[in-house]
Image (cartoon, grey):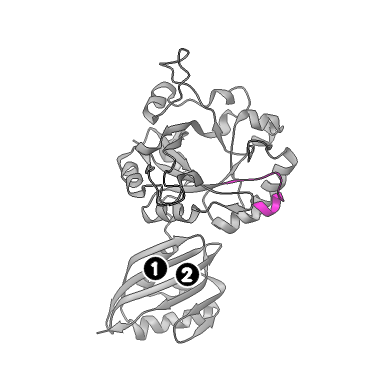
């Protein structure tokens, strides 16, 4: 498995509420059917309505994922870049910018607009994003030379070799495509000078999503039938190299980091998860700043729950918000009802409300 390419699916609002079977996705990832999910966060200044649900599903089921944003040339480009970071934070391992027409009757951003967006985004995330586009679009906006400074995810849909030219039928399954085009780069990229920049190839937009990730029926009463086709993708690099460079494999959710920090009984490790001016609240009081928060954890570890052993029993993720339930056993008693709410900014805790009762 280590010598094969990485395989993945990108999803968007057309999956609709409840339209992804995350347990099935996890089973397929564990079985090596595919390796990752890429999620559309929004278009312009508008966030996809089910984005938080999709992220939460991936987080809950340990599915490697990253996000992409679709800039709209009719909207302030720098404001869009800031909005993307507001939605996903500044510490994702990778960011993807979708460069194409946002609507059928519109146009892609021109070179100047795209450079403005990218400059703002790169200043915020301190790295270069991946560009998703086609060679034809990059050429039409005179961005080929600029694209040499970026890693590229290229869309180039091909027809099945076994049926062409009699039938123009696009690939439906990963294994059929890999059989015909193992380790190739998109043909459209050849001779452009971008061959070494391409790291991912979207080879179909009509793959069999029901087989891989989607439920046919969703929980959305307005649109009970979801999208059963999924965009199928293959890396140009080896699987292990690609996954390590693009996805936050092994990056733990803040709630898992928090419980591990509690288990260390080290106040410094716990407050390292907080922003400098963080707010910490309990039903009895509210305090501000890391020094006061640190003092509270010193009390927690020495008086409230000495020698405590902590376990996370559940959590949910929604954008920059987290809720976490937990239990603990200590020399002073046990906690069966631990419940915390976190507000995050730039992957640090800026607001934290905690509630628990110690019983014998």
Q: CA distance from mark 2 to mark 1?
A: 8 Å
Q: Secondary structure at mark 1?
A: strand
Q: What range is drawn magenta here?
A: 69-80
Q: Are circles 2 and 1 on residues that touch, CB within 8 Å?
A: yes
- Give the side of residue 81 with respect to residue 347, left or right: right
Percent position of residue 127, x then y = 60, 49
Q: Secondary structure at mark 2?
A: strand
Rendered position, 339 above or below 202: below
> At 44% across and 37% down in the image, what residue appears?
230
Q: Quadrant of residue 115?
A: top right
Label ID, residue 342: 2
Percent position of residue 319, x then y = 51, 60
Viewer-closest of 144 and 260: 144
Quadrant location, the C terminus: bottom left
Please say whether residue 125 is visible from this viewpoint: no
Circle 2 crowding by C-alpha within 10 Å: few under 14, some 14–19, many from 20: many
Label ID, residue 324: 1
> At 68% across and 47% down in the image, what residue appears?
117
Q: Quadrant of residue 315?
A: bottom left
Quadrant location, the N terminus: top left
In the displayed image of the protein, which residue is found farthest to the right? 112
Is tag 2's residue or tag 1's residue first in the polypeptide sequence? 1
Circle 1 crowding by C-alpha within 10 Å: few under 14, some 14–19, many from 20: many
In the displayed image of the protein, which residue is found farthest to the top? 166
């Amino acid at each position: 498995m280590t010598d094969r390419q990485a395989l993945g699916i990108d999803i968007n609002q057309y999956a609709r509420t409840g339209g992804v079977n995350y347990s099935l996705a996890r089973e397929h990832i564990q079985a090596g059917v595919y390796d990752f999910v890429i999620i559309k966060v929004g278009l312009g200044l508008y966030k996809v309505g089910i984005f938080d649900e999709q992220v939460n599903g991936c987080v809950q089921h340990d599915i490697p994922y990253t996000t992409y944003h679709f800039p709209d040339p009719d909207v302030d480009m720098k404001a869009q870049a800031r909005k993307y970071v507001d939605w996903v934070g500044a510490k994702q391992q990778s960011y993807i910018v979708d460069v194409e027409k946002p609507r059928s009757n519109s146009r892609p951003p021109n070179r100047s607009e795209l450079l403005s967006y990218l400059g703002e985004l790169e200043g915020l995330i301190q790295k270069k994003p991946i560009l998703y586009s086609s060679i034809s679009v990059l050429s039409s906006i005179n961005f080929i030379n600029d694209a040499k400074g970026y890693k590229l995810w290229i869309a180039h849909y091909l027809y099945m070799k076994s049926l062409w030219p009699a039938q123009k039928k696009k690939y439906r399954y990963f294994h059929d495509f890999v059989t015909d085009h193992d380790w190739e780069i998109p043909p459209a990229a050849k001779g452009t000078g971008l061959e070494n920049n391409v790291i991912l190839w979207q080879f179909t937009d009509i793959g069999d999503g029901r087989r891989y990730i989607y439920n046919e029926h969703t929980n959305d009463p307005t649109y009970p039938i979801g999208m059963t086709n999924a965009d199928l993708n293959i890396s140009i690099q080896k699987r292990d190299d690609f996954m390590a460079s693009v996805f936050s494999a092994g990056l733990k959710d803040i709630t898992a980091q928090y419980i591990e920090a509690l288990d260390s009984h080290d106040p410094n490790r716990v407050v390292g998860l907080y922003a400098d001016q963080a707010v910490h609240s309990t039903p009895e009081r509210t305090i501000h700043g890391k020094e006061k928060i640190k003092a509270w954890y010193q009390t927690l570890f020495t008086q409230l729950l000495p020698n405590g052993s902590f376990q996370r029993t559940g959590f949910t993720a929604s954008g920059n918000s987290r809720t976490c339930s937990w239990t603990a056993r200590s020399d002073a008693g046990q906690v069966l009802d631990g419940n915390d709410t976190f507000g995050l900014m730039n992957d640090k805790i800026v607001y934290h409300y905690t509630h628990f009762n110690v019983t014998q």
